[in-house]
Image (spheres, rainbow, N blue to C red):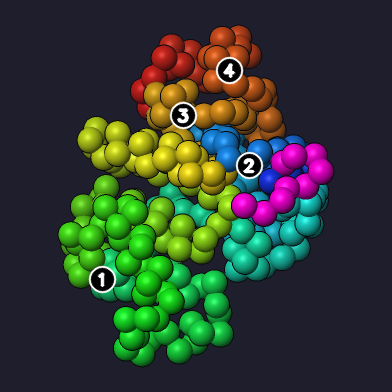
């Protein structure tokens, strides 16, 4: 894995602010994601979690602040250039090519690391095509082999969520942004996703996670940042967050023991 900046953080946000006219959605947020850790961002609806993700990954421009990836300023880079710097993300709502097969979705995602090659990505690839090789590795890694030739629109919701994480991994990132990866899942799929996220951490990836399921957040996070009205309310290890009275009063209440918001 590549070196990290001198302060030890793989990703560091300083004073990140996003305004929409008079409304401030994210207000001076500081965040540090360490390599090989799971860092969760939680908070009530409207706290600014997804907007923060959008600013960090380049989906929307920041109004003010600084975003460093491995010590390099990336706050003015386009999203695809941040991918090339080692970031990748999934979305709260699945963003897949519904009419393509699982394998083709992964091949297209893998081509994103070589944009010029992707311009010619709709031809018939050979078996030694690097993007296809990467797709086949991901099929195995994410247990999607049995449905590799199935159109994505025919997959279960849990399979689609797993595929989206696999597509994020196709970019070979160092930091993976996961926005509500268990949203809409059944109990069995949630357990599988929890295990999958933890396994990515064990493989050395850093993960920045938005998740409402407190069982997952408390069970796998190294660090938790709690947001409220666009600001960081408190940050710490799961046990500290669990016992923080400010957090309880803000929104968790008896939910801190598990369940969904």
Q: Earlier in the sequence, mark 4 or mark 1?
A: 1
Residue under numbered circle 4: 241
Q: Residue at x 44, y 32 (%)?
A: 212
Residue 84 visible in the shown view: yes
Q: Earlier in the sequence, mark 3 or mark 1?
A: 1
Residue under numbered circle 1: 101
Q: Secondary structure at mark 4?
A: helix
Could you say where residue 92 lies in the image, as x and y percent from the top left? 43, 49
Residue under numbered circle 3: 220
Nearer to us: label 3 or label 4: 3
Circle 2/circle 1 CB separation < 8 Å: no
Magenta residues (range): 1-9
Q: Residue at x 62, y 52 (%)?
A: 1
Q: Earlier in the sequence, mark 2 or mark 1?
A: 2
Rounded to the nearest angstrom, the CA distance separating label 3 from label 1 is: 32 Å
At label 1, counting other C-alpha atoms closer than 10 Å, the crowd grade (few under 14, some 14-19, many 20 or more) is some
Rounded to the nearest angstrom, the CA distance separating label 2 from label 4 is: 21 Å
Could you say where residue 156 lies in the image, as x and y percent from the top left? 21, 52
Q: Residue at x 68, y 30 (%)?
A: 232
Could you say where residue 25 lies in the image, as x and y percent from the top left? 66, 43
Rounded to the nearest angstrom, the CA distance separating label 2 from label 1 is: 33 Å
Could you say where residue 60 lies in the image, as x and y percent from the top left? 64, 59
């Amino acid at each position: 894995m590549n070196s990290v900046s001198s302060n030890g953080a793989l990703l560091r946000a300083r004073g990140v602010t996003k305004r929409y006219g008079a409304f401030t959605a994210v207000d001076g947020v500081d965040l540090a994601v360490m390599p090989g850790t799971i860092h969760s961002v939680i908070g009530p609806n409207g706290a600014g979690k997804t907007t923060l993700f959008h600013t960090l990954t380049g989906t929307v421009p920041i109004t003010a602040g600084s975003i460093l990836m491995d010590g390099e300023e990336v706050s003015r880079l386009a999203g695809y250039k941040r991918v090339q710097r080692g970031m990748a993300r999934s979305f709260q709502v699945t963003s897949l090519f519904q009419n393509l097969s699982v394998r083709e979705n992964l091949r297209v995602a893998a081509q994103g690391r070589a944009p010029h090659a992707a311009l010619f990505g709709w031809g018939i690839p050979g078996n030694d095509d690097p993007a296809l090789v990467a797709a086949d590795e991901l099929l195995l890694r994410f247990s999607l082999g049995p449905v590799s030739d199935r159109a994505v629109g025919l997959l279960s919701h849990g399979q689609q969520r797993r595929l989206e994480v696999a597509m994020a991994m196709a970019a070979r990132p160092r930091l993976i942004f996961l926005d509500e990866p268990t949203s809409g899942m059944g109990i069995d799929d949630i357990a599988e996703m929890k295990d999958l996220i933890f396994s990515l951490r064990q493989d050395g990836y850093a993960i920045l996670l938005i998740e409402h399921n407190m069982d997952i957040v408390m069970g796998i996070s190294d660090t938790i940042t709690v947001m409220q009205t666009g600001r960081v309310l408190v940050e710490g290890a799961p046990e500290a967050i669990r016992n923080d009275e400010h957090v309880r009063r803000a929104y968790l209440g008896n939910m801190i023991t598990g369940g969904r918001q």
